[in-house]
Image (spheres, helix red, strand yellow):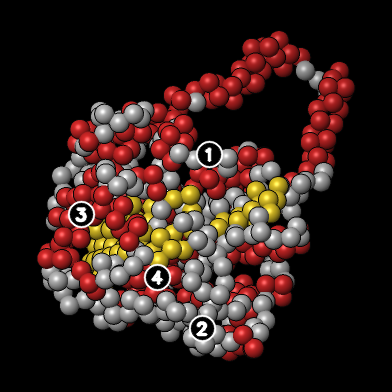
Amino acid sequence: MNDIIAAIIKNVGMIVLCFLPFLLFLILFWKKEIQKFSIRHNCGLIILALAFYLAGFLSLLLPHSGFETSLDYYLKNEPTEIVMQRFGVMVQTKNQFRNMVVSFEDHSLKKFAKSKDQSLESQYGYNVMDIDFDTLIQNETDEQIKAMHRYFKSLTPTAKNEYTGMFEGYNLIMITAEAFSDYAIDETLTPTLYKMKNEGFVFNNFYNPLWGVSTSDGEYVANIGLYPKVGVWSFGTSGKNAWPFTMGWQFQKAGVETFAYHNHYYDYYDRHLSHPNIWKNYKGLGNGLDVKATWPESDLEMIEKTSDEYMGLDRFHAYFMSVSGHMNYTFSGNMMSYKNYSYVKNLDLSDLSKGYLAANIEFDRAMERLLADLERYGQSEKTLIVISPDHYPYGLPIECVKELSKREIKDDFDLYKSALIIYSPSMEEKIEVDTPLSSVDILPTVNNLLGFEYDSRLLAGVDVFSDQKPIIALADHSFMNEEVKYDVKSGKVYYMKHREDDSIVKSLYERVNKKFEMSTLILEKDYYRKVIK
């Protein structure tokens, strides 16, 4: 509520402008004109109004510099951000209502098929499962699910590689770190995070897109490996679905005990529905995790009060959703920033930048304690740790982001560039990864590293070490990879390594759209339950 009130106050001028036409109508027209208004005496005014309306509608047919016309966006529901920007709330509401009651025919799937060159068979095999799509298609009565079967059958799975099973048999600790980023990592202020980032897998081009339900969608993408559905809390909605490729389900299938923790209220974002469905044991503030209720709560205290619950087991998987790095970053409104003020007070930075770093010092202390506890229990050498952010620190003004990151922010891709940590104390040397990847690629990558069986065709992302390279897609369906970047808002294409070929870019754009569509349908239809036995 505090954030909502602050946003209203910040934008009060624009809000007033939204109501200005209505106020003018009341003042200038209603009392004097409405009572004597007649069609007969105002034909010219009516014709003029209709002409303006018709001209506005016909303008939707005008060419656009991107791959979609304005009419395309008008008639469909996504990307929500683009529809909202171009047409406003009413059109988006109309589209969402229409999509609740109307099912559209599936487009041709042939263009998404990728024939496998038999001469280039992977020496390691492929991350694929024995799914009989032909029988599934034959026995299915739902036409939409039939179309899904045909689509996934048409895809080529990703190849296994030299990193497949590198950490087979290891414990796993996964952490979604609140508003974490690469500029929260400092050799002096956050030395443990610095060590973990630079002595494990070093991802030089990791991107962390922002989704509609910020933190919850960030959790969903990293843990489920799909894009979130627009207009709902996808993770909360997922609570009754089967998720066989999530780490919680994979470890439980292997007979390993699983745990999840969150140091804010346990039912926030309906985590009491989503998290027990993936991890057998879930605790948060209010249902068993006895941390002090401050704002925000301490990540260090969460680690201190949970390690003894699982580290004594022969093998385990634990998941944490942190909160210490949460906005706002004032020393009066953020307990973690206040707690660690002495470490940042003399930095030559703005106060909000100092507050952000101070809050993340608490997360660094938590990681220091986590590594110490693993060592104490003798689990250090057989545990893999994965840390990713839920979203960039949008509680910071763009000036602070530039100040901390020390880079130019030209577009959303620059804004969302971030840090992914995959680290084990058992690693003898760091492994640098220059391939661009994003949060949706975490789950297939970790599945591959741990040597779990999964079907790579059924996830939106890809294993970064495989023969198929990731596509970084944003909520508005803008995308980039190693060769090209496409900005949906402007319709501009930026070529980096590839020859200029718009047909390739359009094919990638269609592929991205299909991944969003299928991600939504997998959630809606509980699709995995139908194909994974």
What residue lies at 71% left-to-right and 47% top-to-bottom? 491
State how far apart marks 3 and 1 are (Cα): 31 Å
What residue sits right under mark 4 in the picture? 446
Q: Left or right of 142: which side holds 387?
A: left
Instruction: Tell me the number on the disc at residue 408.
Output: 1
Q: Which mark is residue 368?
A: 3
Disc 1 from disc 4: Cα separation: 31 Å
Disc 3 to disc 2, how far (Cα)? 37 Å
188 relative to 429, above or below: above
Lower sequence index among marks 3 and 1:
3
Question: Residue 352, percent across and down?
Answer: 35, 31
**Closer to the eye: label 1 or 4:** 1
Q: Is residue 238 visible?
A: no
Q: Amino acid at mark 2?
A: Tyr
Residue 402: horizontal and vertical position, in percent? 46, 36
State if disc 4 and disc 3 touch (CB < 8 Å).
Answer: no
Density class for disc 4 (Cα within 10 Å; few <14, some 14-19, many ≥20) is many
Q: Nearer the viewer, residue 372 or 115?
A: 372
- Quadrant that contains the N terminus: top left
For label 2, the SS is loop
Give whichever of 149, 334 is nearer the camera. Answer: 334
Callout 3: helix, strand or loop? Answer: helix
Tell me the SS state at disc 4. Answer: helix
Q: Secondary structure at mark 1?
A: loop
Amino acid type at circle 1 is Glu
Structural crowding at the residue carrying mark 2, measured as other residues with C-alpha within 10 Å and reported as few (<14), some (14–19) or many (≥20): some
What numbered label is drawn on residue 126? 2
Is any part of residue 52 visible from this angle?
A: yes
Q: Amino acid at mark 4?
A: Val
Mark 3 Cα within 10 Å, few/some/many (few <14, many 20+)? Answer: some
Badge 1 crowding class, 10 Å Cα cut-off, few under 14, some 14 to 19, many 20 or more, is: few
